[in-house]
Amino acid sequence: GENVEQHPSTLSVQEGDSAVIKCTYSDSASNYFPWYKQELGKGSQLIIDIRSNVGEKKDQRIAVTLNKTAKHFSLHITETQPEDSAVYFCAAGRGGSQGNLIFGKGTKLSVKP
Amino acid sequence: DGGITQSPKYLFRKEGQNVTLSCEQNLNHDAMYWYRQDPGQGLRLIYYSQIVNDFQKGDIAEGYSVSREKKESFPLTVTSAQKNPTAFYLCASSGGASLTSTDTQYFGPGTRLTVL
């Protein structure tokens, strides 16, 4: 089955710097890769996702890149702000009716003002 | 407003008692999911349902039960057979009118269950 590894487990950056979180997956059949942000006391919110037919996707300060050959994908946050501080989870799964996702263990991002 | 609601936010249970966590969605999604989150671990799938009156076990279904009598509702029961039930439980749903949206899972705010 699918196995997702996420690194680093904790990340601390200065406000304005960039943050990068990386995930690797094992199942070459996985074709859907979402990223979720979890803030204290809240559920997980989808912030960006990418499908296997593209290599990069951007949404304002957030971008995700996918390398299918190497089976890894990364989350990039530019110009970080204190409100970006949260736990971020990556996930990998197959599309279609099942929609099962396997999640990484999370990265706690701290943005220092 | 459209979305997923979970109740209660915090729940305390005595050892040996069953407890049911509520999850409701008004997004007209076909699929619903229950995940468990423990410190230092990713989300693990407990049960999922792709359609009303049907559900499948996830990776850690032992000690849990679910029902899907209505499209909008997917309650999770944590039974006394669950050895270590203290955790944060997240419900999610997916599957709108567009095929490309079927993968995206939207999460509720979660329920934190503590066994005393």
Image (spheres, coloured by chain):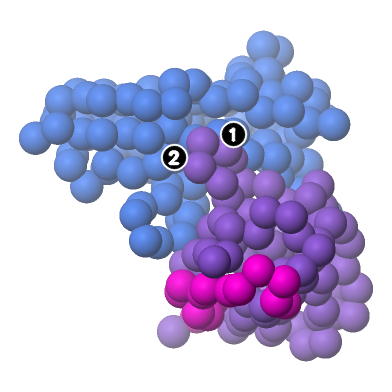
Query: Where does the image place residue A89, in percent across and percent down from the top left?
Result: 51, 40
The chain assigned the colour purple in the figure is: B
Q: Quadrant of residue A73?
A: top right
Report helix, strand or loop for mark 1.
loop
Q: Nearer the viewer, residue B110 or A67?
A: B110
The image's mark for residue A88 is 2
Question: In the image, what residue type sits under mark 2?
Answer: Tyr
Q: Secondary structure at mark 2?
A: strand
Whether the magenta-drawn stretch holds residue A21 is answered as no
Asked if labels 1 and 2 share a chain, the reply is yes
What residue is at 54 percent from the left and 58 percent from the top?
Answer: B88
Q: Is residue B19 above or below residue A107?
A: below
* Rendered location of residue B65, percent (x, y): 82, 70
Tell which of A70 and B65 is nearer to you. Answer: B65
Q: Is B115 rendered above or below residue A58? A: below
Amino acid carrying mark 1 in the image: Gly
Viewer-side residue, B98 vs B26? B26
Instruction: Locate the C terminus of chain A and report the quarter of the image it occupies.
Output: top left
Residue at numbered disc 1:
A104
Count of all numbered marks drawn on residues in the image: 2
Q: Is residue B49 visible?
A: no
Which tint was used for chain A? Answer: blue
Residue at coordinates 74% horizontally, 55% vertically from top-left? B83
Q: Give the magenta range.
A: B2-18
Q: Chain of mark 1?
A: A
Mark 2 and mark 1 in contact (Cβ < 8 Å)? no
